[in-house]
Image (tube, helix red, strand yellow):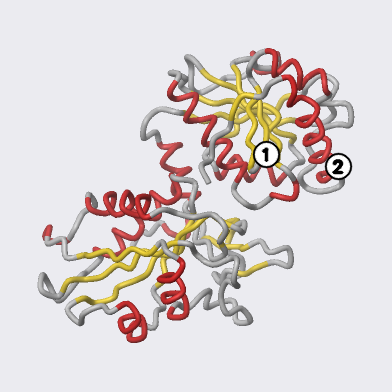
């Protein structure tokens, strides 16, 4: 299903307000608390619609998400030392149906806002979130937004954190966002198709990546049809650190695969070529609002048989691709334990060593 938010009209106002109320009630008493009882009200929603600043996303006629995008910033923003000058946009009141959390919808709404701003010549995005809403703070930081200031807003209690993100092509912020967003996801929405054309676009990215000696020995076998996907899935091994989990269940399995092969008639050794190609594809996956997982633990003999892969080609790895159905968060390594784990609420936690741990001096 194509992700295409549209501008809200007056007849959408009450439905959008109901979505905001549902979000407020779902967030109350959690780490995601954001809005006081009286804000935003129906008049605020109608004002956003009148200014043609409110965007909504529906699936099968049902309202799923809403957000306001304009160049109107709260007065406290005026005193902030913003890093990126020139034209900007502000994002306000991003709301997603609580029943659709952890499906990547909020991230896709933000990508839509950023792309729209970029097309209109804007140089940066500014926004704020409640300081105690730790989930929102993590969300925006993972998208590459940087903290700029603490402000206090009229009629609201507590501190609000202001964020900013550059929209300059290939800015460090955008590259950082893409890399951080490119996480290994192992549960997907099996009800949303990924076309073969999308997979070809991803392979074209890998085609432009570096190759040892410029030999370019890799081949890419694509699968986006359910029948072939069912042939591939049993030959993959998932999440070795999670011992009581055998992989995604039906309904949460990948909807597409790319099998990376090495052509032995070109070379017998493939070095780091497939690693470079796989990560290049995964960055492309993230840029499309998709998610994926590079799988090296593969029943190569069995996969070769079911897919009819000639012995000329070495099976190097398999990339599983789809729309994410789980949340992945990064956290600091503690007590040198680097094993990823899944909490009872289904969130996948990935420990990362600190930058200081990685820097070496003899």
Count of marks, rendered view: 2
Residue for badge 2: 25
At 54% from the left edge and 41% from the top edge, which residue is drawn?
143
> Residue 156 appears at what percent x and percent y?
83, 26
Residue 98 relative to residue 126: left or right: right
Q: Is residue 41 above or below residue 272?
A: above
Nearest the eye: 146 or 43:
43
Residue for badge 1: 61
Residue 225 relative to residue 188: left or right: left
At 23% from the left edge and 53% from the top edge, which residue is drawn?
207
Q: Is residue 234 above or below residue 7?
A: below
User: Which mark is first along the chain, 2 or 1?
Assistant: 2
At 16% from the left edge and 60% from the top edge, which residue is drawn?
216
Q: Is residue 255 above or below residue 97?
A: below
The picture quadrant where one finds residue 272 is: bottom left
Nearest the eye: 223 or 113:
223
Nearest the eye: 200 or 316:
200
């Amino acid at each position: 299903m194509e992700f295409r938010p549209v501008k809200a009209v007056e007849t959408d106002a009450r439905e959008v307000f109901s979505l905001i109320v549902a979000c407020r009630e779902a967030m109350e008493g959690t780490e995601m608390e954001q809005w006081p009882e009286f804000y935003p009200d129906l008049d605020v929603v109608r004002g956003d619609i009148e200014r043609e600043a409110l965007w909504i996303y529906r699936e099968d006629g049902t309202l799923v998400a809403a957000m306001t995008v304009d160049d109107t910033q709260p007065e406290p923003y005026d005193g902030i030392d913003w890093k990126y000058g020139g034209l900007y946009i502000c994002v306000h009141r991003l709301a997603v149906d609580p029943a659709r959390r952890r499906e990547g919808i909020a991230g896709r709404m933000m990508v839509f806002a950023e792309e729209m701003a970029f097309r209109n010549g804007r140089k940066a995005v500014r926004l704020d979130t409640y300081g105690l809403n730790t989930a929102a703070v993590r969300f925006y930081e993972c998208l590459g937004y940087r903290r700029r200031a603490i402000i206090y807003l009229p009629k609201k209690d507590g501190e609000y954190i202001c964020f900013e993100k550059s929209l300059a092509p290939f800015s460090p912020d955008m590259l950082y966002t893409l890399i951080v967003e490119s996480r290994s996801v192992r549960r997907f929405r099996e009800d949303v198709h990924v076309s073969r054309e999308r997979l070809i676009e991803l392979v074209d990215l890998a085609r432009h990546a570096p190759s040892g000696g410029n030999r370019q020995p890799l081949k890419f076998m694509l699968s986006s049809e359910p029948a072939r996907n069912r042939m591939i899935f049993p030959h993959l091994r998932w999440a070795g650190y999670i011992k009581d989990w055998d992989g995604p269940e039906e309904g949460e399995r990948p909807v597409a695969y790319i099998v990376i092969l090495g052509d032995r008639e070109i070379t017998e050794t493939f070095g780091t070529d497939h690693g470079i190609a796989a990560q290049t594809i995964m960055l492309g996956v993230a840029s499309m609002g998709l998610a994926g997982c590079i799988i090296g633990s593969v029943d190569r003999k069995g996969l070769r048989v079911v897919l009819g892969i000639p012995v000329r080609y070495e099976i190097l790895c398999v990339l599983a691709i789809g729309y994410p159905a789980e949340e992945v968060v990064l956290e600091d390594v503690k007590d040198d334990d680097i094993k990823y784990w899944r909490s009872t609420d289904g969130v996948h936690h990935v420990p990362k060593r600190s930058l200081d741990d990685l820097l070496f001096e003899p």
